[in-house]
Amino acid sequence: MKRLDFGYYPSEFESQDEQREFYRLLRQGWQQWKNKRFDEALDTFTIMEKRWPNSPQVLGWLGTVHEDLGHLERAIEYLEQTVRVSPLSELASISLFHVLRKAGEAFQDYSYWDRSIAEAERFIHLLGRPSVQYGLILKDLRGELTDDEVRRHMEEYDELLGEGRDDGVP
């Protein structure tokens, strides 16, 4: 079974001080984002990107913040980078999927929707087994789930994520 890769690990830092600084800034950016101070969060994560340009956590957060600021093209660019550096991250893949769907609606350009389906298929193929979350998303898109079923499955999935979640913030 393939290991899911969510980001930097302690062995990838040159020192414990560097590791502490990484997680201090990550927490700071997350708090700013959580409090809807998106411009401040963007500044924090941009500073981090200069120091850790290949961190999937930093790239993913930059994508998330750009999405919240309405910069959908920039969000897509960052989430595509995240998927490239961490191809087995379901969080990165699903985030990219949703931003592509959102861009398709916003720009009335269905090629974004085609790209979202291609991303789902890429992830499922790479993982080598069905993904629970993508399975539900694709069933919903095909109209095979009622709204109540979608809500129930999302609540169950959120509960599971809460137990062993790795969203990049310790």
Image (spheres, grey):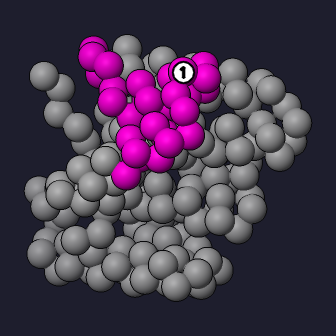
Q: Is residue 157 above or below residue 129?
A: below
Query: Which structural element holds mark 1?
Result: loop
Judge left or right: residue 63 versus residue 9: right
For the point 65% across and 80% down, which residue is it? 39
For the point 27% across and 16% down, which residue is it? 129
For the point 27% across and 75% down, which residue is it? 23
Judge left or right: residue 21 versus residue 77: left
Quarter occupied by residue 98: top right
- Looking at the picture, tell me which residue is in the foreground, 70 or 19: 70
For the point 56% across and 40% down, which residue is it? 147
- Looking at the picture, tell me which residue is in the foreground, 66 or 98: 98
Q: Is residue 94 magenta?
A: no
Q: Is residue 139 above or below residue 31?
A: above
> Residue 61: x and y, percent?
48, 62
Quarter occupied by residue 144: top right
Q: Quadrant of the C terminus?
A: bottom left
Amino acid on which disc 1 is placed: Glu
> Residue 51: x and y, percent?
40, 68
Q: Is residue 48 above or below residue 70?
A: below
Q: Which residues are magenta?
A: 127-155
Q: Quadrant of the N terminus?
A: top left
- Looking at the picture, tell me which residue is in the foreground, 13 or 31: 31
Judge left or right: residue 1 versus residue 130: left
Quarter occupied by residue 3: top left
- Main SS of the magenta segment? helix
The residue that disc 1 covers is 144
> Residue 166: x and y, percent?
25, 57
Query: Does residue 138 show up?
Result: no
Query: Does residue 97 show up?
Result: yes
